[in-house]
Image (spheres, rainbow, N blue to C red):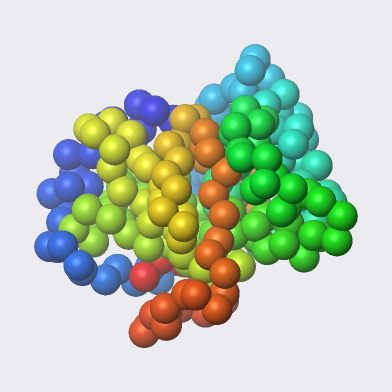
Amino acid sequence: MQHLAIAAITAALALGAGAGAVTTVGSADSSTASSLSDVANPMIAGQAMLTGETIFANAARSPEHTKFVDALKDSGVADILKGKGTFTVFAPTDEAFASMAAGARAALFGPGHRSDLARSMRYLIVRGRLDSTTLLSLIGESGGDVRLKTIEGGTITATLNGPTNISLMDEKGDVADIVIYDIHQSNGVIQVIDRVMTPAAAASRPTVVGMMDDRTPAAF
């Protein structure tokens, strides 16, 4: 939630280790030691988000995520978010999908592009429960930004946009803001974003030394 991000900023920045520092997360679930039974999730467009549901079930309840849910279904990625794993999902709103350039939408949703759509949906998922407090701590420990490894194999860079907001940059340089923080589910957390982030072509990615594999939750 927004107030969690604001309250944690001073402490997170105090942990800064200098620009260019590399952070490795041993367990992104460390923020969930207490039960989720006492968590009050923010609503989305007046719709309650239930901590006992899966990520996919809550996304499907959201009035603002119909296109995202359709993309998860059409790509076959929905099953990942119905399972027992622990994930953080950066979920674009319907407005974010609508604001995509026509060519970019066609590249994802056109006939014969199911594999591209699946890759883009997997790019929005990071292993582990990265709530706003955890993200802010990682940003501070890394000197101002932290690269998160997605289950697609690429990276998303998280940083601060002004004093109270976390921004995310994809591999193409496009930036999204988190607009609703910390919607907790039985198998992870949703961070709602205002822009669709997409991965770079695999062939154009630089080799990153020390990148963690998909068995570990997810920042480096």
Residue located at (20% from left, 67% from top): 20
* Quadrant position of the N terminus in the picture: top left
Please indicate whether residue 66 sits to the left or right of residue 155 in the image. right
200 or 17: which is nearer to us?
200
Please indicate whether residue 28 sits to the left or right of residue 118 in the image. left
Could you tell me residue 186's position as x and y percent?
A: 65, 47
Q: Say if 99 sits above or below 110 in the image.
A: above
Could you tell me residue 71's position as x and y percent?
A: 77, 47
Q: Is residue 57 visible?
A: no
Please indicate whether residue 186 sits to the left or right of residue 130 in the image. right
Could you tell me residue 69's position as x and y percent?
A: 76, 41
Residue located at (23% from left, 61% from top): 142
Residue located at (22% from left, 47% from top): 12
* Quadrant position of the C terminus in the picture: bottom left
4 or 150: which is nearer to us?
150
Q: Quadrant of residue 6?
A: top left
The residue most toward the front is 103
Residue located at (26% from left, 71% from top): 22
